[in-house]
């Protein structure tokens, strides 16, 4: 086992009652304020603060280090703004209170720093800033970029310069930690989220972050180099600092729901639970573990969560407490119903804490964990152990849900709730494919997650961060990487096309032309890369007919979807690489790029991209349309058929508009076709809606109903057996229920106009609210007979648009309106509120 200086965020609790300590922990996040008011000099000049490290510490090996700075204030001013960053990561404390973690993930060319106002935590006289910095080295999460271990703190103005990092800071290496590499059953799955932590309490410098701690034996910090922002002349630092573009993460205390089972705990015997144990998850009673005992307690959070577990103990010197985290329990190689626990075991990654015998010792890992089930395996020595509490602090991007959806089918509200939880757990400092196994921001996943965010919250900051991050991953040839940040490069060329689609979505639903304009040159690079890989039809002159060709063989990984018909996710191709699925994805992206160029780019390129899109779509239809099947084949040789090729044929308008509904009807009903996974059903549903089959949407939710029956509290990556129980690419019903079923869609860039066309299917009643750049769109529908409808609509600000039902359009204006559709004709008028 490698010895590493990892710090779990320990707090010296001497002088605090347990209740007071819990209250302090809950209040600290609200006691500081994130700030983006940055001194302009810090954005284009070198910083006076220097990157520092611990003397004698290796640059790039495993380690955890503590830093302290004592300073005096004659008085506390209204603001005390500082900027801070670290590598790999850090936590900052002010006078013992936890302030901020970071940095928000980026790369060395765009290394984020946090800006916070800590004035409310300071006092006249002596104050202490303290930070813990850790480096997981080769065990670091795949998403963690790194240069070397370091910390930087820069005061914003003259008064705050007193805390600039330099040799006046003190530092110490923490010998308390070992890393626990992921192994055992976890090695069967692709898991790249970083190691577990083993903490030896007897070696830990308890109270290191408190003002009264004696740091006289600590050393003066070692200077690495001066700090400075990205873009300045003669920077000697590999960290090119840029402001954090997103808010601080949410921190909300939460409790475990229940004890599933326990053994050898208190007087519980072998399996029974006592009253103290039953009350323990609510923090109402401690639990005693006798000396020389092997005990086990399995807890259920009731839903999956991403959180910092906090275990509070006293006594137990020489004991070992193992914390294991899992999305679900296992029986053999199957998970089964996630609510069922009988005969199942926990398998997952873990942390380990070895108490030193002190009172009110808190174990909290450096980085958050993902779990529904959490198990304690305890071995005590000669000293009995008391578990004072086990709680957690939920963390994720601080989205606020503004959308609402209610109908006469309560299961749909349950689907919305589970989808929202899925989306939240997969959104932190970046979007993530899954929180348990990878925590990587993939363009294909993120395109869907971004739409869910916009429709559920109206908050576009994490969307913009994703667009920008993927842009920062570009290769010299023009492609974006498939996922970013990631220290191991990976390339999925179709995901570069979906990056363009993501930008198109942001423009369509939020506008943001000024933000997006900077990426046009790189969008052009993606289109150029694909255009250069078009191949001429058999027998044609390459140069003269290249523009009407399909894509040829592409480098890297041509992933499209997980299913039995696409080996390793790659759709069928001919020997030369020709594929309807890949070519049509390019046609759609070229059309999206044309829209962006028309709006705020080059009219000439827009015309070229539009023609290119049409030509590829027409060539695909000509070579891959199979009249006997009435579908687009996967390749020109017509040897296989998938839902995907015809779905994309509809979305790219390769299939004539008059035929699209018939094609989609076959796609939905022909089970011999290679089927879409949860992920690609997002595009299936879009094609259904485009082809006029939106009213069949609710009938396609069977996979999500099956997941509910299996007790999943978030949506899985794939049908059973699945690796990940939480994969946000499966959360698109949250978008579809609002955009398709409630029918609230943008009909102009920036959502400048709305088109409301409900597809109620079997529903008789529906009420929905959608966040909009100008406020909120609200609708309520009641069916009247078989095809009649009473609709109430409220539009915010100056928003106008159209309401469509059974092919009849009524113009909408700002404010309230009341519509009555009877016998396929409008029989009502606008209401008085907001009328013309």
Image: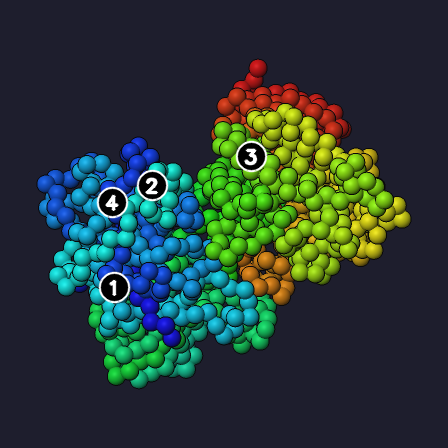
Give the Cα distance between marks 3 and 2.
Answer: 27 Å
* Depth check, front residue: 109 or 342: 109
State the separation of the CA atoms marked 1 and 3: 46 Å
Mark positioned earlier in the residue sequence (1 or 3): 1
**Residue at 56 percent of width and 17 percent of height:** 835
Say which label, 4 or 1, has the lower sequence index. Answer: 4
Any part of residue 4 in sight: yes
Query: Which quarter of the figure has residue 825?
Result: top right
Q: Position of residue 541 (x, y in %)?
A: 81, 40
Of the numbered discs 3 and 2, the one sitting upstream in the chain is 2
Task: Give the x, y percent position of residue 620.
Answer: 79, 43
783 relative to 265 in the view: left or right: right
Instruction: Depth check: give the residue in front, 42 or 449.
Output: 42
Q: How is the image coloured?
A: rainbow
Q: Circle 1 is placed at which residue position?
A: 56
On screen, residue 171 above or below 739? below
Local crowd size for mark 4, using a 10 Å CA cut-off: few (<14), some (14–19), many (≥20): many
Circle 3 SS class:
helix
Q: Secondary structure at mark 2?
A: loop
Distance between the alpha carbons at the discs numbered 2 and 1? 27 Å
The residue identified by callout 3 is 521
Q: Which mark is residue 49?
A: 4
Residue at the image point whose x is 25% and y is 64% from the top: 56
Q: Are marks 4 and 1 in contact (CB under 8 Å)?
A: no
The first of marks 4 and 2 along the sequence is 4
**Residue pictured at 79% horizontal, 37% vertical:** 545
């Amino acid at each position: 086992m490698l010895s590493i200086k990892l710090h779990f965020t320990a707090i010296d609790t001497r002088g605090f009652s347990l209740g007071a300590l819990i209250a302090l922990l809950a209040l600290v996040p609200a006691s500081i304020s994130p700030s983006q008011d940055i001194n302009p000099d810090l954005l284009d000049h070198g910083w006076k603060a220097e990157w520092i490290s611990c003397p004698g510490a290796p640059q790039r090996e495993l380690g955890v280090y503590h830093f302290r700075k004592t300073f005096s204030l004659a008085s506390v001013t209204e603001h005390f703004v500082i900027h801070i960053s670290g590598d790999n990561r850090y936590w900052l404390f002010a006078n013992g209170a936890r302030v901020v973690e970071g940095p928000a993930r980026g790369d060395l060319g765009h290394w984020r720093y946090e800006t916070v106002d800590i004035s409310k935590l300071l006092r006249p006289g002596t104050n202490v800033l303290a930070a813990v910095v850790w480096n997981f080295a080769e065990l670091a999460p795949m998403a963690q970029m790194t240069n070397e271990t370091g910390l930087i703190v820069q005061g914003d103005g003259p008064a705050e310069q007193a805390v600039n990092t330099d040799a006046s800071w003190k530092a110490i290496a923490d010998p308390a930690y070992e890393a626990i590499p992921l192994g055992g059953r976890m090695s069967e799955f692709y898991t790249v989220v970083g190691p577990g932590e083993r903490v030896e309490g007897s070696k830990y410098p308890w109270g290191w972050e408190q003002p009264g701690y004696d740091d006289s034996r600590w050393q003066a910090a070692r200077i690495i180099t001066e700090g400075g922002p990205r873009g300045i002349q003669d920077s000697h630092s590999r960290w090119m600092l840029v402001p954090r573009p997103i808010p601080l993460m949410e921190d909300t205390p939460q409790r475990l729901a229940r004890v599933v089972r326990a053994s050898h705990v208190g007087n519980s015997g072998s399996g029974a639970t006592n009253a103290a144990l039953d009350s323990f998850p609510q923090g109402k009673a401690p639990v005693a573990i006798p000396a020389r005992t092997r005990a086990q307690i399995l807890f259920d959070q009731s839903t999956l969560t991403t959180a910092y577990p906090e275990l509070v103990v006293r006594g137990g010197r020489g004991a070992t407490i193992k914390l294991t985290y899992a999305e679900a329990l296992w029986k053999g190689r199957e998970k089964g119903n996630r609510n069922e626990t009988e005969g199942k075991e926990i398998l997952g990654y873990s942390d380990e804490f070895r108490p030193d015998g002190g009172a009110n010792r808190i174990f909290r890992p450096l980085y958050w964990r993902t779990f529904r089930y959490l198990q304690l395996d305890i071995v005590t020595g000669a000293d009995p152990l008391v578990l004072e509490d086990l709680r957690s602090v939920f963390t994720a991007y601080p989205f606020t849900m503004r959308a609402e959806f209610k109908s006469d089918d309560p299961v749909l509200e349950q689907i919305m709730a589970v989808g929202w939880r899925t989306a939240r757990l997969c959104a932190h400092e970046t979007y993530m494919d899954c929180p348990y196994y990878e925590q990587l921001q993939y363009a294909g996943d993120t395109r869907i997650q971004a739409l869910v965010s916009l429709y559920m919250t109206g908050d576009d900051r994490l969307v913009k961060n994703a667009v920008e991050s993927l842009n920062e991953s570009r290769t010299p040839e023009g492609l974006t990487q498939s996922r970013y940040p990631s220290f191991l490069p990976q390339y999925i060329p179709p995901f570069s096309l979906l990056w363009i689609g993501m930008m198109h979505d942001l423009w369509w639903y939020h506008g943001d032309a000024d933000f997006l304009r900077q990426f046009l040159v790189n969008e052009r690079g993606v289109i150029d890369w694909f255009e250069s890989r078009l191949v001429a039809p058999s027998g044609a002159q390459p140069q003269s007919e290249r523009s009407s060709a399909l894509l040829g063989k592409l480098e890297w990984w041509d992933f499209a979807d997980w299913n039995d018909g696409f080996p390793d996710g790659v759709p069928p191709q001919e020997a030369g690489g020709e594929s309807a699925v890949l070519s049509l994805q390019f046609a759609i992206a070229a059309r999206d790029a044309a829209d962006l160029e028309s709006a705020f780019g080059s009219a000439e390129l827009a015309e070229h991209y539009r023609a290119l899109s049409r030509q590829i779509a027409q060539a695909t239809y000509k070579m891959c349309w199979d009249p006997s099947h009435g579908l687009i084949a996967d390749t020109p040789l017509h040897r296989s058929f998938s839902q995907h090729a015809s779905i994309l044929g509809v979305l790219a308008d390769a299939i004539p508009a008059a035929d699209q509904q018939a094609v989609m009807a076959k796609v939905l009903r022909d089970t011999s076709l290679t089927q879409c996974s949860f992920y690609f059903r997002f595009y299936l549903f879009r094609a259904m809606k485009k082809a006029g089959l939106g009213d069949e949407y609710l009938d396609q939710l069977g996979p999500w109903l099956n997941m509910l029956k299996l007790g999943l509290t978030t949506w899985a990556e794939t049908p059973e057996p699945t690796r990940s129980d939480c994969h946000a690419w499966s959360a698109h019903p949250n978008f579809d229920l609002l955009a398709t079923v409630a029918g609230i869609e943008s009909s102009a860039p920036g959502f400048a106009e709305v088109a409301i066309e409900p597809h109620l299917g079997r529903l008789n009643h529906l009420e929905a609210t959608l966040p909009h750049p100008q406020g909120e769109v609200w609708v309520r529908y009641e069916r009247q007979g078989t095809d009649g409808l009473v609709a109430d609509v409220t539009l915010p600000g100056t928003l106008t648009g159209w309401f469509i039902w059974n092919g009849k359009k009524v113009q909408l204006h700002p404010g309230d309106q009341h519509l009555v559709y009877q016998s396929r004709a409008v029989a009502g008028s606008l209401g008085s509120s907001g009328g013309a």
